[in-house]
Image: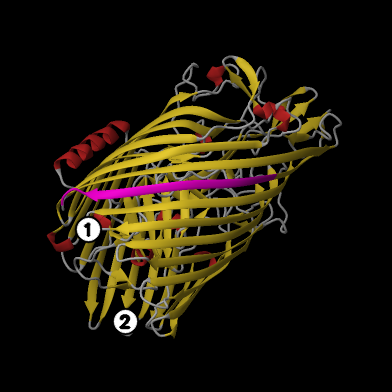
Amino acid sequence: MIDRTSCLRAALFAGAALVAMPLPTAPLAAQTVPAPQAGPDGVIADAREGDDVVVIARRREERLLDVPIAVSALSQADLAKLQAIDLSGIQGAIPNVNLVQGRGSTTSANFFIRGIGQPDALQTFDPAVGVYVDGVYLSRIQGALLNLFDVQRVEVLRGPQGTLYGKNTIGGAVNIVTRKPDLGNFHASADVTYGAFDQVLLNGYATAPLIADKLALSLAGTYDTREGLVTDPLTGRRFNDRNLWAGRGILRFKPVDGFEFTLSGDYTRQRNAATLGYPTAPLLRTSLFPAGATVLVPANPFGPYNFRAATSLTPAQGQRLDHWGIGFTANIDLTDTLQFVSITGYRKLDPSFFIDIDASQFFLGDVFVGVNQKQFSQELQLKYNGSRLKGVFGLYYLNEDVRSNQTAFGNDIFSFLGGPVTFTRLINDFQNTKSYAAFGQLTYDFTDRLGFTAGLRYTREDRRYNRFTTTISSLAALNNLTFRFPDNLPAPLNADNLASFDAFTPSFTLSFKPNRDTLVYASANRGFKSGGFNGRANSVNDLTLVVNGTPTIVNRFRPETVWTFEIGSKASLADGRVKLSAAAFYSDYSDFQARVGGGVVGAANTGVFPVINAGRLRIWGIELETIVKPTRALTLTGSFGYLDARYLRFDDGRRVPPGTFSCNPTGAAITCRPAFAPPISARLAGDYVVPIGTNKLTLGLEGRFIDKHFLSVDNRPGLTEPGYALGNAYVQLDFERNFYVRGAVKNFSDTRYRTDGQEFSSVANIQTAYFGDPRTWTIGAGFRF
């Protein structure tokens, strides 16, 4: 692992480079260069020198080099080189971006950008990185780890995007653009892949005009299956498998010039076994009489992690997900400079997951989570594109309903007089969210070189939440413990299940272009993540915080806000053979929302789950990227990110004494660092093309490095990733007749590395880590025409 002195030296060197050079700002893994490129199906093919990448990061089409935002645009070619089947394949490819499979589910996503995110999949916790598919916002991180079978481009915007994208984008936004039907020609592509652990991956895509130049249809589908990576040595059963298929259809209608309408529908179906982690701390049983605790399972029960873990789940207790949506987009040119856009979306999400949080053969943290979520959104935009003045104004509305039923099994948590105590908790809750926003952003070019952008968004959100929990236990003291929110709170809180939050999120950017292919900019942006209710509260104790030294019931948590100040530069040099970028930023992050485990006021840990606005963070960092094409055959890509994230204040008055919480600077312990914020992230890759007659052979090699980081708020040792390096490689032979064969290896050093963690230390001392895939290989073939 790189020491901190080296990190600081690297940061200072990079900062000096930023000041001295007219460098770019977008992660250059995104910037398509004249390297071997992929066609619509991911086949690597030649690209022209000087190609311009077009993005919609500012809600209008612009060259990537003209966008004064730290944005990465990963094309189909880039995704093929990264061997990315779903969004988790991007992990390590973009500086200061953590994008991994969320804990306990193959389709949940854990997004952190520049140290800001939200890993909890519970419906009352909003993500801090917004995910959009063709302009439609996805409210939940469940189902957000999208497969990339029909994607034209993935844009990753770093830093708060509160003006144009709204709430819950304080870390950034992931903008997924799908392939649209071709109005004039028929195209088709397909590929089949077989790999380690009996992986079978099938992709297909076809687009055809139904009425020439007016109406076209595209259909795309994927089937992805793989045996489990994890084996339970006690039963021989396998877990952490893949079993998913998905499809999308898009109808594009262009009756006359200036009018275009798109109707899309997609469906994803997942059926697989549970996803298991590994216990990194001793699992305990509490003895009620006499008082004390016994160790049921030691930390790392099967030795160093080697994809072995136990579970108490039965073969029938797996994971199911159905996720579908429809979208309608209208683009109407009102004049040569004025355009009206309407984006309408409806989505339905139905996950039913069994999760063994403790990853052991005992009933300590086994849960069933069934969610029924639906959302409707409508966005109206008016875009102006004048010679000097450009802008977009809009209105936005979102209405989301989320119902869940949960069952927690804890038969092995307690013992009484030496005997087991059965314990089950039943939970039902409902949340409705209505969000309203009005926004506008204008760019004025004072000269051909100098421009200024200012924007403002007003967001209001109204939430209503109800919750009921009850327990069933063989011990009378634990049986029939019920809690209703808000009914069981003292007056007047017992009638308060409504909350409203609002915020203004402005943005300001000054940009300067010395020439067409160089950009320098400075910006200030504010982001906002909504507040809400504690969706884990099972008693009044969960809602009791210390305010000014007095225990106080707080029935909701406040929104988070962040101000980010950034300078950056982008440049394309030597006729597009060299592309460089750099950015430096500083973020002031307030009212950080944290779920903390542990005790109530005046008592030891008792299994409660408070959610607090813990305090304030200061985050700064740099990002450097380059793509160099020294010859027509060779392309080199490099990226480097440095991140310094730390708490300026972390207030948790629930801890007794406060010093027992390592993140509390008023205690004796050293303050800790925020989770999922590795100081160093880096990537180096190369692609070399060898002509073979009329065919060509492409060889690719890359290395990724992620520095030490923490997987829990309070930096528990077992939930720490000490840093890792991964190596990937591929070889592809493209034939003249649009046919290709490909072989690839991921993680060829077979590195063991942690990606996420479950921290419920107040329940049986649960601290479970989740790991990335071992070494895997694939072979495949495909065609396109």
The residue at the point 34 percent across, 41 percent down is 507
Q: What's the residue type where badge 1 is placed?
A: Ser
Residue 344 lies, in percent from the top left, at 52, 61
The residue at the point 80 percent across, 24 percent down is 289
User: Can you tell which quarter of the image residue 208 is in?
Assistant: bottom left
First reached walking from the N terminus: tag 1 or tag 2: 1
Q: Identify the coloring.
A: secondary structure
The residue at the point 43 percent across, 60 percent down is 176
Residue wearing tag 1: 387
Quarter occupied by the C terminus: bottom left
Residue wearing tag 2: 735
Q: CA distance from mark 1 to mark 2?
A: 46 Å
Of residues 41 and 123, the one drawn nearer to the viewer in this rendering: 123
Q: Is residue 497 above or below residue 84?
A: above
Q: What's the residue type where badge 2 is placed?
A: Phe
Residue 769 lies, in percent from the top left, at 54, 43
Residue 69 in sight here: no
Of residues 680 and 773, the one drawn nearer to the viewer in this rendering: 680
Magenta part of the chain: 430-447
The residue carrying pointer 1 sits among few (fewer than 14), some (14 to 19) or many (20 or more) residues within 10 Å by Cα, namely few
Residue 731 in sight here: yes
